[in-house]
Image (cartoon, grey):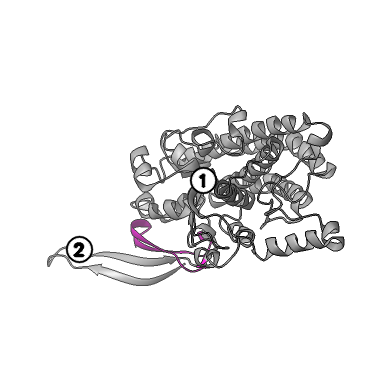
Amino acid sequence: MSVVDQHHVMLPEGSIGKQTSTLNLGPTHPATHGVFQNILELDGERIVDAEQTVGYIHRAFEKLAERRPLYQITPLTDRLNYCSSPINNMGWHITCEKLLGIKTPKRVDYLRVIIMELARISDHLICSSVMGVDTGAFTGFLYVMQYRELIYEIYEEVCGSRLTTNIGRIGGFERNFNDIAFRKLEQFLDEYPKVLKEFENLFTRNRIFMERTMGIGGISAERALNYGFTGPNLRAAGVDYDVRVHSPYSSYEDFNFNVPVGSTGDCYDRFLVRNKEMWESLSIIRQAYQKVQEFKGEEAEVFHADVPEYYLPKKEDVYTKMEALIYHFKIIMGETDIPSGEVYSAVEGGNGELGFYLISDGGRTPYRLHFRRPCFIYYQAYTELVKDSMLSDAIIVMSSLNLIAGELDA
């Protein structure tokens, strides 16, 4: 952070002049949680005004998508909210399936739910623990971080990747879940609730944490809706909206879970809502795992829909059979025309409604693809949320919104 300018407000002769300072919070300061800049005007330590700047990591995702076949777009979605990239991947595949008219088997839906809810926990786990770090408590971050690692190990068993996962395929998964993945999942379901409870005990009624977060960065339900808030930040303001409930996908209608809702829309309520959502995600994962175990025989081996035009053949077949090699080449290189049409599909991402607006003109790549990134919408409200608060509050507000720079500029 550096003071870059000072302003002297001209007042009538004989009166005391008021001085404000302009301060750059970012784009490379570690407290900014990503590569973006906030230009703050300060009166002492109080924020008088703020201006946001995005564009430091503009990667032209939407323009790139117009030149790539469907499968080659999946890795682009990883780089949006990289704290929960599997949700981005699944959301894109579900969008493709909506355009292509593909119906996925129930077992595929349940496996997807397991992975997406693990990703939601991973996302919330980071956000809540970093809020602790930004208020001066590093211990809670260390308590939960080892379980993000366990989630990543489950990803590795499913797809071989950890952070930017490229997980899944159009119609399902690349491979079936192995025994190690299920064993690690059982370990997570057994151990994480105890750690989450201990984490909550460290913060929820902690006097210092409460004073740093209660009444800070609050927003009303009306203002949040006007901005276009979704996800935990909207629910913390008292609006009961969750894409999984209002527009179910991946058979979410088969699960029983509650949607936590706050009332004040401040940093403290956002923290509480995300913590409660982790408990609900644990419940959903248990239900999905139980449903997966009910499949027997050949049904227990189903991990993708029957769509050979879009699903890669087995590697051993590619090496030994000409037809499989041809399909492999056509799918990877995007040699299959996709039907023309216009679809919008959304999933409940870690930060809110993650939407994909896809227009196809019948070619081999999208005519137009727009990503609805929830963080980009939250960031518009940042000035309003931090105005008249203290400089130290600017950081905790940023943490509570869970602003991920990868979602700011597509």
Residue drawn at x 48%, y 59% is 408
Q: Which residue is mark 2?
A: 16
Q: Is 106 located above or below residue 8 in the figure?
A: above
Q: Residue furthest front?
A: 323
Label 2: how many residues lie within 10 Å, few (<14), some (14-19) or many (20+)?
Answer: few
> Horizontal and vertical percent for residue 9?
22, 66
**Mark 2: amino acid:** Ile
Q: Residue at x 64, y 59 (%)?
A: 71
Q: In the rendered structure, find residue 63 and report the number of the disc placed on it.
A: none
Observer-nearest residue: 103 or 362? 362
**For residue 316, side relative to residue 295 (left or right):** right
Left or right? Give the position of 67 relative to 23: right
Which range of residues does the magenta coloring cover? 32-60
State the residue position of label 1: 346
Residue 268 part of the magenta segment = no
Res. 207 visible in picture? no
The tag earlier along the polypeptide, 2 or 1, is 2
Residue type marked 1: Ala
Q: Position of residue 304 (x, y in %)?
A: 72, 45
Question: Mark 2 or 1, which is nearer the eye?
Answer: 1
One can see residue 370 in this view: yes
Q: Residue furthest top?
A: 256
Graded by Cα atoms within 10 Å as few (under 14), some (14 to 19) or many (20 or more), the crowding at tag 1 reads many
- 59 lies left or right of 111: left
Nearest the viewer among 97 and 180 is 97
Residue closest to the eye, 392 or 357: 357
* Secondary structure of residue under mark 1: strand
Give residue 102's position: percent from left, percent from top: 62, 45
Quadrant of the image occupied by residue 289: top right
Q: Nearer the viewer, residue 402 or 45?
A: 402
The residue lying at 79 percent from left, 59 percent from top is 324
**Residue 310 place in picture, x, y as percent:** 67, 54
